[in-house]
Amino acid sequence: MFLPFLVNLRKRAMKNHKDTKKGKKLWGGRFQQETDALVEEFTESVSYDRRLYRQDIRASIAHARMLGERGIIPKEDSETIIKGLEKILDDIEQGRFAWKKELEDVHMNIEQALTELVGPVGGRLHTARSRNDQVATDFRLYVRDETAALDELLQRLQQALVHQAEKYMGVIMPGFTHLQKAQPVLYSHHMLAYFEMFKRDRMRLADSLKRTNVSPLGSAALAGTSYPIDRLMTAKELGFEKLSANSMDAVADRDFALEFLFCLSVIMMHLSRLSEELILWMSSEFSFVELPDAYCTGSSIMPQKKNPDVPELVRGKTGRVYGSLISLLTTLKGLPLTYNRDLQEDKEQLFDATDTVKLSLAVMSGLVENMRPKEKRMQQDTLSGYLTATDLADYLVRKGLPFRQAHEVVGKAVARCIEMSKELGDLSMEELKSLHPLIDEDVKGVLDVEGSVRSRNCPGGTGHEAVRDAIEKAKLWLKEQRKDV
């Protein structure tokens, strides 16, 4: 089974194999043999790292401008290089650029194209620079750009959650612990719980950006450079807030990528928790929510089915993102300083994880925005499960009974209700008074679900006033975040 795979791979490799000028790579001065076609297939990364072309060209323009300003290369050469890079950017954007696997990666493809376009002057671009600090710079720029994109998508999802909370304010549902009914809560309160989760995700991404937004450009291969470069100039042009402090660490560091993947993993964990609840809520056993048809699919054999495939796939893809984090952690764990080719394996997983999270956020935002809670079903479900048991215990405490004794009294009351197939609210006044002498006529209001919810108006609670206040604070926070961006 394995041999045909190798045969086919070599055939494909030979078909794609094209010699560069004089059969040499841009780095091939000391080599006497051409790279084996299978090795080219094995080592190339341009098939996926080409997505860094914007960051690579932007960083190269900043580097070229600095070289000209510092007199390291003639200023007219710097201007020629910049114009050539701008032309290449336009060619890529317009689909006119031919990517070549034999040139290994995005960096060598662009450099080779530049030399073909502007002549030997293009060879000056790599002065005072190595692919090591080049790729580290490009990768940081990419993560920074994607952090901004993810923040925007998280904001959209938060807005959808606030929309649900505001539109369906007043809808009461059972709150759960251990997946068992616990206490009545507002549906709006439940939606805002996820708002807080995604708020932390945005804050976590913003914090990670402090360690991402550091310029490694100028570290060269590992030891810095002897040319009189101006690292602050390139850092400023590229929007970096700081310079890396150690050239060896700068080219070897991928902590920022790990931290980014961790942030993505937590986002997916939160999305997966939301997905799990929506899957449960859509089932006939719960029937708490109606998901929009546009975000569900049917069955190939059972015409009655409406399946929550979007949340199921989000839940499933969570493991894929976790895998990317574990993969990079494993890649890095045994690497000596400084750069090793193993670091080529940092991008494909991160690209995939980024795409997965962005698409998951986008589809979940649309789903949440357009879903509808089944108010009557939720309300009906609060009438069973002894959801006001804690309220009864608190009632007894306010009457002077120590909480542990009150807890025991109510526990026995629930046991009696189970025997009688009754809810606490179904007990007659005589039955209630028989539970404890402190219980009086005013207990009936305590056993009311609506009253239970309204009583919890402490900050962060599920009471109507507290939740309305939380909605306004959420809207204000979103508005302030937009201003900051």
Image (spheres, rainbow, N blue to C red):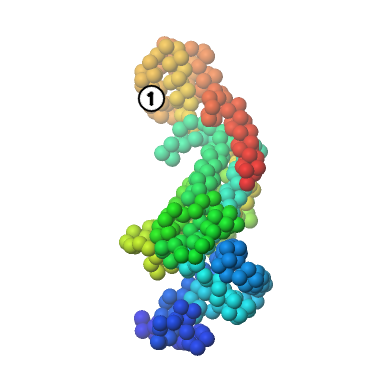
Q: Is residue 472 above or below residue 407?
A: below
Of the pair 436 and 392, the residue shown nearer to us: 392
Q: Is residue 204 above or below residue 421?
A: below
Residue at the image point whose x is 46% and y is 65% from the top: 226
Q: Is residue 469 visible?
A: yes
Residue beneath disc 1: 411
Q: Residue furthest bottom?
A: 22
Residue 455 at x, y percent in the picture: 54, 23
Of the pair 422 and 240, the residue shown nearer to us: 240
Residue 107 at x, y percent in the picture: 52, 71
Q: Is residue 360 visible?
A: no
Residue at the image point whose x is 58% and y is 66% from the top: 71
**Which quadrant is home to the N terminus?**
bottom left
Residue 130 at x, y percent in the picture: 47, 68
Callout count: 1
Residue 340 at x, y percent in the picture: 38, 67
